[in-house]
């Protein structure tokens, strides 16, 4: 975990242990880059409310009971009605309030845990992208099936043996494929990827890496070895949005997070996001959100 934080910083928990330590959960995984536990095992002594933070790891939550729990992701309050399956990916800003009776399973892992099986995790499981919907509502049959899978995963995790880590790696991969099938049902997409879909996936991954450094569509096209016009046409056809729109939406997500959760002033945020002048940032933010940065911050 980052140390000596000023009021302008949003803490980053690079691994599950740092996260557990911050919320007062007396649990430490014996497996590097992986953890699974029952939510009710966290007990009444952990924090009931957590201010904004970021994670350096992925998190899957399968909840059986949410009660009055509230979960915010990138300034959006998630809808937990029904039987939710939800995800947190590295870089997102998270905050929450926990109902004392919340129950279910949490799985936490860093991409290194699956590096041997899935060296390009986002390509294989695009629902783990920053821009995807973070909550999927399950049917009772889907929820029951996933719950059984997680009970078995948890059982294997609690009983160390020589092949435990390899088994958990395989079980996590199987779980992610099931989540992928649910995600595709939600999006009603085809299972195969066209060249256009591959380009769109690569572009969105680049946006997550480069959106602060460059807002120029041509720079992304150059990285993908295609023309800017072809990139724009491809993205527009698949998403209904231009390539520029997607870059700006990612920039807006980060802008809102910094405005809502950091102590940085408007000029500092503007320069951090690589705007040449604070007025340029204000104009950008108002054009996309309908509010000035100060108006959004006062909400």
Image: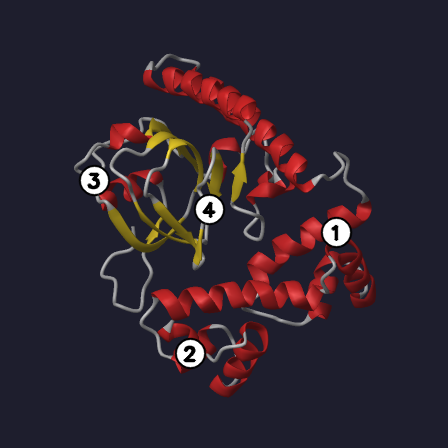
* Mark sitting earlier along the chain (1/3): 3
Mark 3–mark 2 distance (CA, rounded to whole Å): 34 Å
Tell me where residue 266 appears, x and y as whole percent. 40, 80
User: Circle 4 — which element?
Assistant: loop
Of marks 3 and 2, the one in the foreground: 2
Along the line of sight, which residue is nearer the eye, 134 or 144? 144
For the residue carrying disc 4, how many other residues have a C-alpha within 10 Å: few (<14), some (14-19), or many (20+)? some
The residue at the point 31 percent across, 72 percent down is 263
Vertically, is 76 above or below 63?
below
The residue at the point 45 percent across, 67 percent down is 256
Task: State yes or no: discs 1 and 2 in contact (Cβ < 8 Å).
Answer: no
Q: From the image, tell me which residue sits under label 1.
A: 199
Tell me where residue 32 appears, x and y as whole percent. 37, 31
Of marks 1 and 3, the one in the foreground: 3
Residue 262's image quarter?
bottom left
Mark 4–mark 3 distance (CA, rounded to whole Å): 23 Å
* Mark sitting earlier along the chain (3/2): 3
The residue at the point 73 percent across, 39 percent down is 189
Task: State yes or no: discs 4 and 1 in contact (Cβ < 8 Å).
Answer: no
Of marks 1 and 2, the one in the foreground: 2
Drawn side of residue 261 relative to residue 74, left or right: left
Q: From the image, tell me which residue sits under label 3.
A: 46
Q: From the image, tell me which residue sits under label 4.
A: 79
Task: State yes or no: discs 1 and 3 in contact (Cβ < 8 Å).
Answer: no
Of marks 4 and 1, the one in the foreground: 4
* Mark sitting earlier along the chain (4/3): 3
Residue 107 visible from this viewpoint: yes
User: Which disc, if any, is residue 295?
Assistant: 2
Vertically, is 157 above or below 97?
above
């Amino acid at each position: 975990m980052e140390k000596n934080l000023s009021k302008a910083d949003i803490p980053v928990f690079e691994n599950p242990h740092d996260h557990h330590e911050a919320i007062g959960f007396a649990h430490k995984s014996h497996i590097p880059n992986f953890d699974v536990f029952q939510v009710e095992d966290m007990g009444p002594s952990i924090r009931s409310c957590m201010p904004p933070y970021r994670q350096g790891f992925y998190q899957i939550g399968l909840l059986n009971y949410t009660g009055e729990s509230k979960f915010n992701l990138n300034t959006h309050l998630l809808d937990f009605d029904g039987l939710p399956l939800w995800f947190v990916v590295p870089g997102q800003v998270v905050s929450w309030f926990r109902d004392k009776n919340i129950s279910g399973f949490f799985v936490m892992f860093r991409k290194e845990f699956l590096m041997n099986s899935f060296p390009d995790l986002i390509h294989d499981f695009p629902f783990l992208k920053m821009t995807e919907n973070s909550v999927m509502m399950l049917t009772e049959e889907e929820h029951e099936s996933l719950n059984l899978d997680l009970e078995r995963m948890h059982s294997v995790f609690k009983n160390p043996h020589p092949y435990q880590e390899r088994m958990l790696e395989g079980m996590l991969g199987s779980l992610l494929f099931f989540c992928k099938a649910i995600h595709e049902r939600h999006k009603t997409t085809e299972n195969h990827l066209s060249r256009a879909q591959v380009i769109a996936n690569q572009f969105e991954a680049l946006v997550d890496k480069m959106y602060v450094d460059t807002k120029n569509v041509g720079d992304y096209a150059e990285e993908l070895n295609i023309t800017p016009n072809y990139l724009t046409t491809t993205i527009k056809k698949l998403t209904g949005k231009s390539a520029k729109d997607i870059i700006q939406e990612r920039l807006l997500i980060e802008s809102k997070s910094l405005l809502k959760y950091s102590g940085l002033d408007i000029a500092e945020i503007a320069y951090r996001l690589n705007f040449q002048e604070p007025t340029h940032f204000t104009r950008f933010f108002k054009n996309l959100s309908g509010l000035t940065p100060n108006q959004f911050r006062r909400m």
